[in-house]
Image: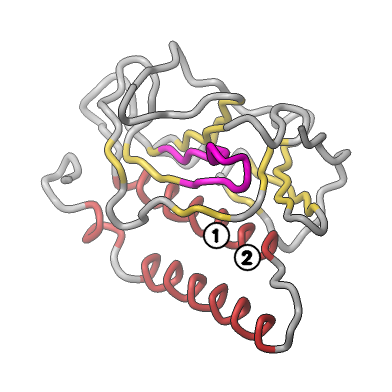
Amino acid sequence: MRGTDGGHFGSQRGFTLLDTVVAMSIVAIALLAVTALHGARPPERRVAALALQGALAETRALAASNADVTGSVPTGATLTVVPLPSGRGTQIAVFASRPIAGAPALVADSGFPPISLPVAMWVVGQTTAAQPFTVFVSSSGYASIAANFAYDPARPRSLTNDPGCDEANGVAITVADDLAADTHPFACRGAQYDVDTNATLAPGRRS
């Protein structure tokens, strides 16, 4: 797929982001291998939190390179977080464009294939482990969160407007495995999930 200036999205983002995402993936795999070698249970929630952080970085970069300055609706990008049908795990996927009225149809990001993770994820106070959520990132880098909404390419649908982000009360996302749950802050401006800082908000309820 091409951007509005005719160039490929991947070439516009360059190699820095790609190298970063690949490096994060290698570190995550190495972490799993080392813990398995020593007989310890892999910290699945930590690996998944890093994967979510990497997916958001990809979504931000895609949104920045996918700005439709000629249209009335900036294009941006989308990150979906959807519970697996089995009830044991979550899938993360990245798309170009946003499912809001007036924006072009979403296209799967070929540079970041969907990832299935053996954890539950939810937005504190907005969703449960059994509900999906979607992060929209505008071309300016601002994030909005649509609770209990998942974009399905097979049955596409749009929201009437951008859902916004609750900056006043703060936003946090929890990642949980079978052992524990870690909750970290999410910044609406910049669309960043900080896996190195524990959120001060009350933990969300798992269904």
* Disc 2 crowd, CA 10 A, few/some/many (<14, 14-19, 20+): many
Q: Which residue is mark 1?
A: 51
Along the horizontal axis of the image, is 198 left or right of 49? Answer: right
Q: Which mark is residue 47?
A: 2
Residue drawn at the location 43% of the way across and 47% of the way down = 59
The amino acid at mark 1 is: Ala
> Which contiguous range is marked in magenta?
78-92
Residue drawn at the location 38% of the way across and 24% of the way down = 99
Which quarter of the rendering shows the C terminus? Answer: top right
Can you say whether 82 is above or below 46 in the image? above
Which residue is at the far left? 6
Numbered disc 2: secondary structure: helix
Can you say whether 177 is above or below 87 in the image? below
Distance of mark 2 from mark 1, alpha carbons? 6 Å
Marks 2 & 1, CB-CB < 8 Å contact: yes
Return the x and y of residue 143 as percentages of the image width and height: 54, 36
